[in-house]
Amino acid sequence: MLVGVALVALAGMVATGIGRAGGADRDAATLTVTVDANDRHDFRYSVSGPAGREGVGGAGRDAVLDDDHDPARRRSVTFTGLGPGRYTVTQARAPGWDLVDATCDDGTSADLAARGATVRLGRGDRVTCTFRPALERPLVGAIRWDAWHDGPVGRAVEYTLAPPEWRNRLPWFAEVSPSGAVRTRADAPKVAAEEIARAARLGIDYFAFLWYDSDRVVGSEDEGMMRGLRYYRTSPDRDRVKYTVVVDGDRLADPGERATILRYMRDPNWVTVAGRPLIFVGLWADPARTDVEALRAASRAQGTGDPYVVQTVIGASSPSGVQRTVRTAEAAGADAVSWYSIAVPSAQGGPYPLLAGTAREAWDRAARLGTPVVPTAMAGWDPRPRVARPPFWGDSGRSWFRAPTPAELGRHLGEAVDWAATTGAPAVLVYAWNEYDEGGWLAPTLVPDPARQDAIREALVTRR
């Protein structure tokens, strides 16, 4: 949440003659107000100060600001031509949001209970005040595995999901021809925008995109798997859902890949927690401490702050597996641990509550070892389509669980949010947004399932 956002709409005060324009008087003071929320939510502020030509008027003025790409609302405003006196900036109450910090660079501290800061300006003073609102509940993210394209991986999953028994889990954008051929292509601007809209309606705060090599030629496996992120980043609707990435240790170690990630981290819609850019590292290769430290140093140097690095593994729900995960995170200098997915290796058609309970046990085990945890909620696990028709990279094992009822899924998602809030975790990660062929998805399907969608929204939006 460290993207500078400033009290913008108040610029009209200068235009209407409140204060002297453009610093015509070198002795006049200026006041810049910044809102730093890392969210598209609109926040209302008021500024009051000495009445008269050199002030903003005793009655105060309102301004509505946000922190996204919307050109209609800028991120900062500087009031010029201000005379000496006390000026108060106040943030209006926003349901679902807390004001967690407000400071001014002259040393003034805010009254958080009153949601305001009062600054005393002398002649020629230049003061900037920054307000940082935050959601009252942890952020909820969903993993994006974007195999839904015309590349080698995309054609493989089309083949895997083609049998009639799996068509109930085809993605909402899928097409089935009269001959039974399946087409699942999401690599288009219109689909990308609709994915964002559907996630926002369900209460998803951010996507966690799997990171593949970013410099591969068009048509390669890696290039295809990065298209979802590419279309998301160029969508005009991208601010409705923030984003981060899940990158394995080998790719984090590559200076070129790390540089690209750092460039993306400068996006206003890269998700942050407590003002720190959130990133998940691990998966197939554990990160090295030197690479994590290089990421941190470069991020601080470019002004995006110290990343909140989450060590992420696949499986490892057993006591020994969790212990190894925690040790790996400590060795790498990560801030927290999480999981890409959690499962019971021996399960064959087990009930979904067993899967949800296994996930909860993994969170608790890691927490008892004294490490911060970003809990991973499991939307399901059933890779049987890959067993029947294995893709070229192999299946995902023989364990599987029965699909959750809408109530079971909603209960597990709500439990993850409550667990995170109780333990102070800044975020939740959900497996997954679109792992249709592996059995974990929150996104809508080709065959509508409104009860499931309502349960997700109830857990993530209505109960906030």
Image (cartoon, grey):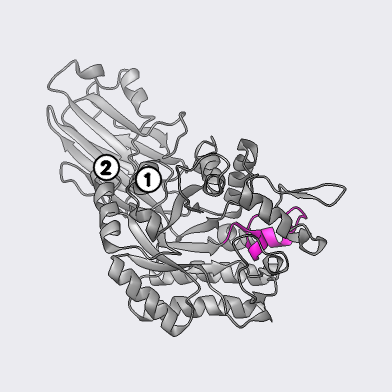
The answer to whether one can see residue 455 in this image is no
Q: Position of residue 456 (x, y in %)?
A: 63, 61
Q: Which residue is mark 1?
A: 265
Q: Quadrant of residue 56?
A: top left
Is residue 61 highlighted in magenta?
A: no
The answer to whether 328 is drawn above or below residue 121 in the figure is: below
> At 53% from the left edge and 42% from the top edge, which residue is drawn?
232
> At 46% from the left edge and 40% from the top edge, which residue is drawn?
42
Element at label 1: helix
> Quick check: 459 left or right of 165?
left
> Quick check: 415 left or right of 194?
left
> Could you give the CA–CA distance between mark 1 and mark 2, rounded to whole angstroms?
10 Å
Q: Position of residue 278 (x, y in %)?
A: 38, 55
Q: Are marks 1 and 2 in contact (CB under 8 Å)?
A: yes
Q: Residue furthest top?
A: 24
N-terminal label among 1 and 2: 1
Q: Between 53 and 313, which is closer to the camera in this rendering?
A: 313
Q: Which residues are magenta?
A: 432-453
Element at label 2: loop
> At 68% from the left edge and 50% from the top edge, which residue is drawn?
155
Estimate how packed mark 1 is, as few (under 14), some (14 to 19) or many (20 or more) residues with alpha carbons within 10 Å.
many
Amino acid of disc 2: Gln
Q: Position of residue 68 (x, y in %)?
A: 44, 38
Q: Position of residue 30 (x, y in %)?
A: 21, 28
> At 13% from the left edge and 27% from the top edge, which residue is drawn?
124
